[in-house]
Image (tube, helix red, strand yellow):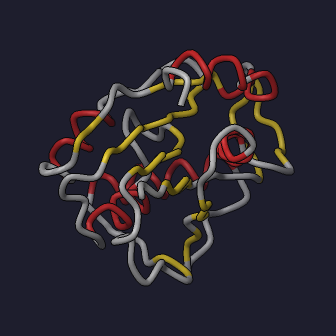
């Protein structure tokens, strides 16, 4: 029996949203993941960092840039013991500096994704998937990587139809 997992990293606090910096009570990717969880039968897991990202948008993006430049792998708070029971992974993340946040890379490097179906879902404010799909191929070379779905962050409240279309009726 095939089992699915929704894994996501989301950032509430200050975010770039529709041309402005605003405080989001719930991060865009969390909204996407929660919407998806109402559509499919899947377990859900939120990637959380041990060392919280700054509240301030500019401080947060500076840290994210430094982590990417230095190939840093932030530590995950309460990591999953295993993903062995899952065949399908829906991976939600935001676009930071043209790819996924390095904490998502930490997650991907922590497990064996051999023969697992990965459906990337990326929230952005105009930069789409960036190079995250090619980075995913490098990080999970033995997985079955499906075409990514990019969702404009300021439109996540109406993302159900986009998820239905983008995931092919999953």
Residue 38 higher or lower than 122, as above or below: below
Q: Quadrant of residue 135?
A: top left
Residue 21 horizontal/vertical position (percent): 76, 34
Residue at x 63%, y 50% (from the top left corner) = 41
Closest to the observer, 108 or 24: 108
Image mark count: 0
Left or right for 72, reference 80: left
Residue 134 horizontal side relative to residue 124, left or right: left
Residue 50: which quarter of the image?
bottom right
Q: At which x and y percent is residue 78? A: 55, 83
Give percent across and percent down for residue 37. 69, 47
Q: Is residue 44 above or below residue 30?
A: below
The answer to whether residue 151 is above or below residue 102 is above
Most extreme residue toward the front, as rendered? Answer: 1
Location of the N terminus (image quadrant): bottom left
The residue shown at (47%, 25%) is 149
């Amino acid at each position: 029996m095939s089992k699915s997992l929704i894994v996501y990293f989301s950032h509430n606090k200050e975010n770039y949203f529709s041309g402005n910096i605003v405080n989001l009570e719930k991060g865009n990717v969390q909204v996407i993941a929660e919407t998806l969880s109402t559509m499919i039968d899947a377990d859900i897991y939120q990637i959380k960092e041990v060392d919280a990202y700054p509240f301030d948008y500019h401080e947060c993006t500076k840290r994210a840039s430094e982590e990417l430049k230095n190939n840093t792998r932030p530590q995950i708070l309460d990591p999953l013991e295993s993903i062995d029971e899952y065949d399908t992974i829906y991976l939600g993340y935001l676009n930071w500096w043209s790819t996924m946040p390095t904490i998502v890379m930490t997650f991907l490097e922590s497990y064996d994704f051999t023969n697992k179906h990965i459906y990337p879902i990326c929230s952005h404010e105009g930069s789409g998937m960036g190079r995250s799909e090619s980075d995913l191929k490098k990080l999970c070379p033995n997985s079955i990587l499906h075409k990514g779905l990019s969702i404009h962050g300021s439109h996540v409240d109406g993302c159900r139809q986009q998820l239905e279309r983008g995931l092919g009726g999953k």
